[in-house]
Amino acid sequence: MGSRIRENVKQIFHCFCEVSCPRPGEDHARIIDKFPYDYQEEEVLKSISKFTYPCEFEHTAIQHYSFVFTNEDSKWTFGFCRHDPKTDAAFVFLSSLPWHDTFYKLLNQISEVSQSYNPVEQRKYFLEALYICDIPTNGTLVIPWNGEQTFVSRCPNVSELPSIPENRNLTEYYSAADAHNMAAIFASLLHERRIVFVSRRLPRLSACVQAAASLLYPMHWQHVFIPVLPHPLVDYLLAPMPFLIGAPVPVFQSINRSDLAEVVVFDADTNTLQSPFDDLQNLPADVVSSLRRELRSQAMLGDGMARAFIRALVMLIGGYRDALRFHPGQRITFHSDAFVESRPSPVQPFLRKVLQLQLFQQFIEERLEMLNGGLGFSDEFEKEICLYSGRSSSRLRQQYKEWKRTVRREGTAFFKTMRNKANPAMKSAVKTVREHGREVRAACKDIRSRLRDSQLEKKSTADTNPPRPRPRLKATASYKRRPLHVTKAESRTRSESAPAAPGAPPIPPARSYRHIPALDHQVAAAMALAGSSSSSVATSAGPEETPAPAPAAGSSSSSLTAPSAGGRSARSSDAEELLREYGLDFSALRLRAGAATPDDVPSLPPTPPSTSPPSSLPPTPPATSPPRTPPLPARPGG
């Protein structure tokens, strides 16, 4: 059956009727005029009188509404009515075109012509011009009539989605139902429930039913469809098959509500929905959330509302193209399992139910018929499928973001629950641990403060009393003024004339002194020098040195000799001067055999053996050089 809209329509309307209001005591209204005059469809004419005045209703203002006939071929024929409270008659157009707004304008034009100076003739001219007019292909209906006047109106494009406020039905439905109720009614339609719209106003009633059915595009409602139910057909509300009916309040109140089992009822006057089913929750969660989000947005002007529902259908059944199978020489077929697997796993349980829906089966049959007949199709639904396929690459990222938000939200709720439901003992324990923690932190802070104060105190004391450096004796001015030079002959004579005592380590060779030895060593050297100067042994004044006499037996190994320097003997004045520099009394010393006795001079520690080779001495200065002081003895351990 596919679409319920008839195709290849040749005429704009089938019949025009003027229907009088039923008089008191009459069961139905009467047709007082029609065009064309030879229209002989008696059953249709009887139905027109029933649907034009379906029940008693108040009409204090001009009202436009529509009704629908279902023909033998299951195609719909639309009736468009105009009620004027100033007259007791209504104007009706019967057509196969679902041009609601266009026919409402035509009805207004008929009413205006009927009030002219010659209403019968003028209306006849206008209806004849309209009847013979071809279906416009450019979207604009232009009707020249009476030789001077022209009627112009825009026609709806069936390839476009209905928009607000151009589409009166959609605008009325949007103002009557909120986002949740529209989504719930949409879910009930997808489950093919028995649905009833109720209202006291016929324009609102018919508009809401027509709009709800149009939001199923590209599918079409395949069951009983009556936008305005006349009172003689009230038994349709008790039918066991699915239906979508608009019942005026007087008609709906004429039946027993207990007889309406498993019926979804929406009151368009109060925006209340009563349903024994939970159809909205049976839809996939991502489809519902996306639909609600788009319906609650502010971008409902234009085709935003219709596009929100078509995107929901794309998410549900847009994968039908993945289930089409084509083999050379055979017709294109539809594979049900491939259709279910074309969508994510959360959607698959619902898709298995969709396969059993008559409206989906008719949709697939219509698409296969077009494909096998060589006809292509490119409607808004197919365009949205392409857009959805382009966005599917980012679907995993979006799901990850939603999962992360859910985990964060549930984690926060969990911790809040644990905090609110903690028993007093747990709270007390937490408080105790927290207090002890503060005490421990305070104690640690105090210890760190004491350590820091102690370190500062030590540092302050060290700055006030710096450590005394190790005393060292610097060279005298006379020593600096008279550099020491020893000849090779002197070194050789010294080493031969002063042999070491038995068992004692050898005395290291004389060398130039970089550092001043300790005080006791200098004293011993001075004493040895003094003994050498007072000796009776005379030194020759020649250029060659005279070997020093060997020490007496039993003398200490620490006794030192001072060889003559520069070919002259050491003078006592020089020894006295040196002793005075060190604060010693020369007269108090007892000299024996040119050297200090062991009783007078403290014994020196044994000199450790030297591992370094003797350093080379500088050459003897020329005879014209100033007199030089004799070299000091080597420092023990030096």
Image (tube, grey):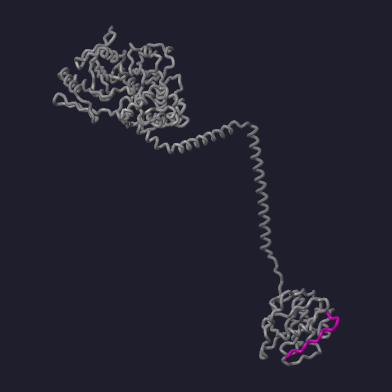
On the rendered image, what quadrant is the C terminus found in?
A: bottom right
Q: Residue 38: give x, y in percent of width and height.
A: 19, 14
Question: Looking at this view, is 261 or 429 the one in front?
Answer: 261
| Horizontal side of residue 482 vs 236, given as left or right | right
Dividing the picture into quadrants, the one containing residue 92 is top left
Q: Residue at x 23, y 21 (%)?
A: 13
Q: Residue 98: give x, y in percent of width and height.
A: 28, 23
Question: Looking at this view, is 283 or 348 the one in front?
Answer: 348
Q: Residue at x 23, y 29 (%)?
A: 137
Q: Is residue 546 magenta?
A: yes
The overriding secondary structure of the stretch rendered in magenta is loop
Q: Residue 214: give x, y in percent of width and height.
A: 34, 25
The extreme right residue here reads 554
Q: Residue 636: give x, y in percent of width and height.
A: 76, 75
Q: Is residue 92 magenta?
A: no
Question: Looking at this view, is 159 or 375 the one in front?
Answer: 375
Q: Is residue 476 above or below residue 375?
A: below
Dividing the picture into quadrants, the one containing residue 569 is bottom right
Q: Which residues are magenta?
A: 544-556
| Horizontal side of residue 215 vs 141, given as left or right | right
On the rendered image, what quadrant is the N terminus found in?
A: top left
